[in-house]
Amino acid sequence: MEVSIVGSGYVGTTVAACFAELGHSVVTIDVDEAVVEAINDGRAPIHEPGLGALVAEHGGDRLTATTDYGVAPETDVTFLALPTPSNADGSVDTSIVEAGAESLGAALSGVEDHLVVVKSTVVPGTTEDRVEPALTEGGADVDVAVNPEFLREGSAVADFTDPDKVVFGTDGGRGVETLRAVYEPLVAEVDPPVVETGRREAEMIKYANNAFLATKVSLINELGNICKAYGVDAYEVADAIGLDDRIGERFLRSGVGWGGSCFPKDVAAIIAAARAKGYEPELLEAAVEVNDRQPGRLLGLLDSHVDVAGKRVAVLGLAFKPGTDDVRESRAIPVIEGLQARGAEVVAYDPVATENMRERFPEIEYVASAAAALDGASGAVVVTEWDEFAALDDAFDAMAEPVVVDGRRIIERRDGIVYEGLTW
Ligand code: UDX
């Protein structure tokens, strides 16, 4: 099929390359000329495992890019994969999606039988009330569907290629036939469950998915805090409860909490959307509160062993999770702020996220290895579970005061250091 995708960010580029791999002819539309040039040259504009190889293979061939919406009418279907950032009150800002829909609608004016698919994360009713009117105001005759993405950073290509589910939200028109045809090669290959539902339901599924997972982590963090108070190992408890199929073993790693580009934004957006309808979502608010509390608890444990004022403290891990250089909403941010408020001299290490964190905290010291961060430090906190932190061995011997507070259960308890696990 001929597929166009508006937006060559994280989701748009991954989906475009994966659709090309499935055999479709794909053109992405983006305002950023550098991104367009990269794709046409066969270079991935973002770093994601497996993506570089796909763009190298198909870029400039079955996968092309342009800044011109004029290509859309030559395709069978157009996906909107534009960002939906947060407003100051946490609600979702749909202005970029709406502007994209307007430009697309103008390009599709007079075209018949075209399907537009919203991939951006938007609250229920947005497609119907805002995107569809923006598309059709220029006279375009289009069907509009919703097809959310559940890709994780660091495994986006694998998540696309072998998804837990695919969701088609349509108003029952011809849209569902087109979506089935687009996904047919994927369904033939890995046969994922395909959920065919309404557009509002599809919009809500994305938020419900992320709100559920974020709340699951906050719940295990709350249970973990109680475990800690009673000298119980929360990881042994989590392993056991995870054996119950109704609970499931995944997303039960307790610690310093969740961050990233999706969970904080999406949970805030669904809270704001609930309030807009007069419903106070207390459980989701509590999930955020527990998440906000964990960095302070980590520092509280450090305080119980060492007064860090005027002392060097190592922060191990800056990325919001391992396998990425993304520091958006990373728990390292409140941890560093807390250390600064205590008058500590922060020395930070991350294998890949240093440059991104330097933009946020230019004033702290960044070093090239975990061992260098620990050298002479009176206390260390672990914020990201990079594998290399499990193999630090003798590096702790160089600490001035060997107190280690682990927020991710990556460091082994050992002789010669004071070791505190956040929930164990
Ligand atoms: C998430 C969703 O998983 C994905 O489906 C959606 O499309 C985008 O948001 P991502 O943000 O890439 O993906 O990260 P994910 O691996 O889900 O982790 C999110 C956060 O939760 C990280 O900060 C991670 O450290 C934390 N987490 C996760 C825990 O603290 N404990 C766990 O057991 C799992």
Image (cartoon, grey):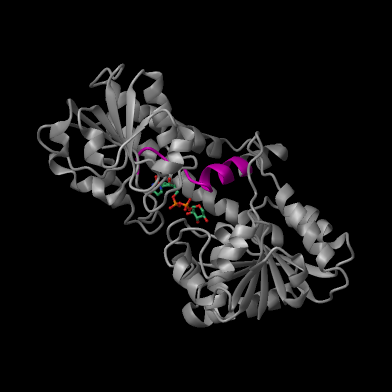
Query: Is residue 422 in view from this perspective?
Result: no
Along the line of sight, the residue nearer the viewer: 247 or 373: 373
How many numbered discs sit on the rendered protein? 0
Residue at (39, 22) in percent of width and height: 340
Q: Is residue 404 left or right of residue 196?
A: left
Q: Is residue 421 left or right of residue 149?
A: left
Q: Check the image and report above or below for 26 versus 302.
A: below
Residue at (43, 26) in percent of width and height: 337
Locate residue 234, reporting x and y percent.
29, 41
Image quadrant in which you'd find residue 199? bottom right
Image quadrant in which you'd find residue 277? top right
Along the line of sight, the residue nearer the viewer: 191 or 66: 66
Q: Please report the bounds of the magenta region as a residue range.
A: 254-269
Residue at (81, 69) in percent of width and height: 142
Residue 255: within the magenta? Answer: yes
Residue 418: within the magenta? Answer: no
Q: Check the image and report above or below for 358 versus 159.
A: above
Rendered-image quadrant of the C terminus: top left
Q: Is residue 206 left or right of residue 219?
A: right
Residue at (60, 58) in percent of width and height: 34
Rendered-image quadrant of the N terminus: bottom right
Q: Is residue 38 left or right of residue 315?
A: right
Query: Is residue 358 in view from this perspective?
Result: yes
Locate residue 115, reporting x and y percent.
74, 71
Locate residue 331, reporting x and y percent.
42, 37
Locate residue 335, reporting x and y percent.
39, 30
